[in-house]
Amino acid sequence: MVSKNHKIFLAGHKGHLGSAIFKKLKKAGFKNILTIDKSKLNLLNQEKVFKFLKKNKPKVVIVAAARVGGIHANNTQRAKFIYENLTIQNNIIHGSYLSEIKNLIFFGSSCIYPKNISKPITEKMLLTGKLEYTNEPYAIAKIAGVKLCENYNLQYKTNYKCLMPCNSYGPNDNYDNKNSHFIAALIKKIYLAKKYKKKQIEIWGTGKPKREIIFVDDIADACIYFMNRKTKKTLINIGTGKDLSIESYAKYLIKFFNLNLKIKKNLNMPDGIKRKLLNVNLANSLGWKAKTSLKDGITITLKDLNKKNFF
């Protein structure tokens, strides 16, 4: 059991997921959260990461640091995505083992699973088929992280857990035109359409692929829950168990903004994987469920955007 006074190292504390975890840990009363800026610790530097972990010896390590992005970023920065993610996670996971840190939470993504699956994806489906080519480098890196944790648990009796969330959204998301995930891109397009009184928005591909999304605070909640939960399961899906087509999300957001916008489909852009709905029965059976409705999540996200005057 992790007490409120135990030291917790959170890697990636300024990112979309990391910042949500940091806030949740603070709210839950954890008093010894260890963070460090990129300028002071380059997670790609193995020697420095090992020294940092050995010196600080946290009770728990949370790996929320990663190079992430949407379909364009994944497909055009393929070498960066595989190299940086492999290096960051290898440094932190092996460094934790060397410093005798037994508890670790590693985050991946639903894109680690095969592309041609038409039903909710269970954890057992990992490595049962081909990956989606557009995000293959990122997926391979994250699969390696899962297997690293699994085999350290087997050989060294560590308690390393891998949480695989579906697409997230919420405060502190990445809204870059080329590098964001689809839901952030939709929110930005519709937000700006309202601001500048536009009559249409463009979506990539056919709009038919289905996606499951989860509010980022729910992933942070899962992190803290499983940090304090004993289980022999290394890999756990984190999601809502519901999905919609990308076009349906666009229509929902247009209605949410109370707008009358036309949707233009750019068929020159790829669809990506057809469906990525996760089976979350394992997480549910262990006592965790997502709590935030789509309406509440979007409301909080927009409040955050308006407060920051982001665009």
Image (cartoon, helix red, strand yellow):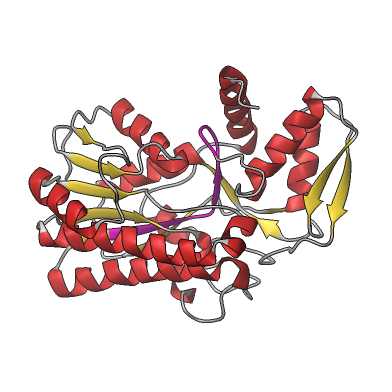
Quadrant where the N terminus sits is top left
Q: Is residue 279 visible?
A: no
Report if residue 165 lies within the magenta region: yes
Total labels: the figure holds: 0
- Foreground residue, 233 or 219? 219
In the image, 250: left or right of 107?
right
Q: Provide residue 158's location: percent of width, then percent of height.
A: 17, 63
Quadrant where the C terminus sits is top right
- Foreground residue, 107 or 283? 107
In the image, 266: left or right of 277?
right
Q: Provide residue 127's location: percent of width, then percent of height.
A: 47, 79
Q: Provide residue 297's location: percent of width, then percent of height.
A: 58, 33
Secondary structure mostly seen in magenta is strand
Name which residue lies at 45% across and 71% down: 140
In this rendering, the answer to whether 61 lies above or below 279 is above
Report if residue 270 lies within the magenta region: no
Query: Magenta span covers which residues?
Result: 161-173
In the image, 289: left or right of 48?
right
Name which residue lies at 60% across and 49% down: 179
Q: Is residue 283 visible?
A: yes
In the image, 151: left or right of 171?
left
- Foreground residue, 45 or 224? 45
Name which residue lies at 49% across and 40% down: 216
Name which residue lies at 77% across and 43% down: 250
Q: Provide residue 243's location: percent of width, then percent of height.
A: 65, 54
